[in-house]
Image (cartoon, rainbow, N blue to C red):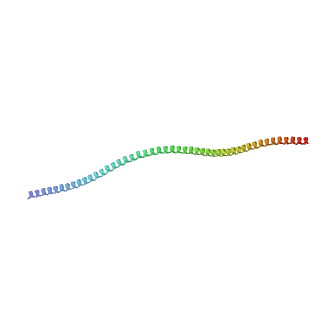
């Protein structure tokens, strides 16, 4: 019996040891499960962080591309602004030149109108002078004719006077 008691106590120790081992195994298993769970959670977090880092890199690249595009647009805008300013100055110069030419044209038209008025006045004056010259010629012709008539009258009156003297002498 002692042996059996001893054997029983050994078996109880073994059972206790096995239970302890089982308990330790359960704890280890639980700890491993927890560790695996935490490991999986950490892996998910690492994947999320890697995804965020990749997204951040992609966003940074997009930002850099946008920044380059913006700088190019700013340069293009500045170039266009310079061209616009140059064209605006040229337009203003052309407008000034147009205004000057328009003013000169108006002055030329005014001068032409004044010259036309002068030409018309001179033509009227020339016509009037021509009419005066024609009237003058008529008057000269009439004066010559009057002179001729006076001459004829003088001749006739001289002849009459002579005739009257002759008649008075013959009587």
- Residue at the image position 33 percent from the left and 48 percent from the top: 54
Question: In which quadrant of the rendered view does residue 159 lie?
Answer: top right
> Could you say which is closer to the camera, residue 142 or residue 131?
142
Left or right: 146 with respect to 89? Answer: right
Residue 143, image quadrant: top right
Residue 129 at what x, y percent from top left?
A: 71, 44
Residue 74 image point, x, y percent: 45, 45
The quarter of the image holding the C terminus is top right
The residue shown at (31%, 50%) is: 51
Furthest residue toward left: 1
In this view, the residue farthest toward the front is 171
Nearest to the observer: residue 122 or residue 135: 135
Question: Which percent across, then down, holds residue 135?
Answer: 73, 45
Q: How far across and down, in percent of the image, does residue 167 sit?
A: 89, 42
Whether residue 160 sits left or right of residue 11 in the image: it is right
Q: Nearer the viewer, residue 154 or 8?
A: 154
Query: Is 15 located above or below residue 53 in the figure?
Result: below
Number of numbered tags placed on the structure image: 0
Say left or right for 1 vs 146.
left
* Residue 46 appears left or right of 140: left
- Asked whether 48 or 105 is in front, the reply is 105
Q: Quadrant of the N terminus?
A: bottom left
């Amino acid at each position: 019996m002692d042996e059996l008691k001893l054997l029983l106590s050994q078996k109880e120790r073994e059972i206790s040891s096995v239970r302890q081992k089982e308990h330790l195994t359960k704890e280890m298993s639980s700890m491993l499960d927890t560790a695996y769970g935490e490991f999986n959670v950490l892996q998910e977090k690492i994947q999320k962080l890697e995804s965020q880092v990749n997204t951040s890199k992609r966003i940074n690249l997009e930002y850099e591309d946008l920044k380059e595009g913006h700088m190019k647009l700013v340069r293009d805008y500045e170039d266009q602004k310079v061209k616009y300013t140059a064209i605006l100055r040229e337009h203003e110069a052309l407008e000034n030149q147009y205004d000057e030419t328009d003013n000169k044209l108006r002055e030329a038209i005014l001068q032409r109108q004044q010259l036309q008025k002068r030409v018309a006045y001179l033509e009227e004056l020339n016509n009037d002078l021509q009419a005066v010259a024609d009237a003058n010629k008529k008057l000269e012709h009439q004066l010559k004719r009057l002179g001729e008539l006076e001459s004829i009258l003088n001749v006739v009156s001289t002849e009459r006077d002579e005739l009257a003297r002759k008649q008075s002498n013959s009587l």
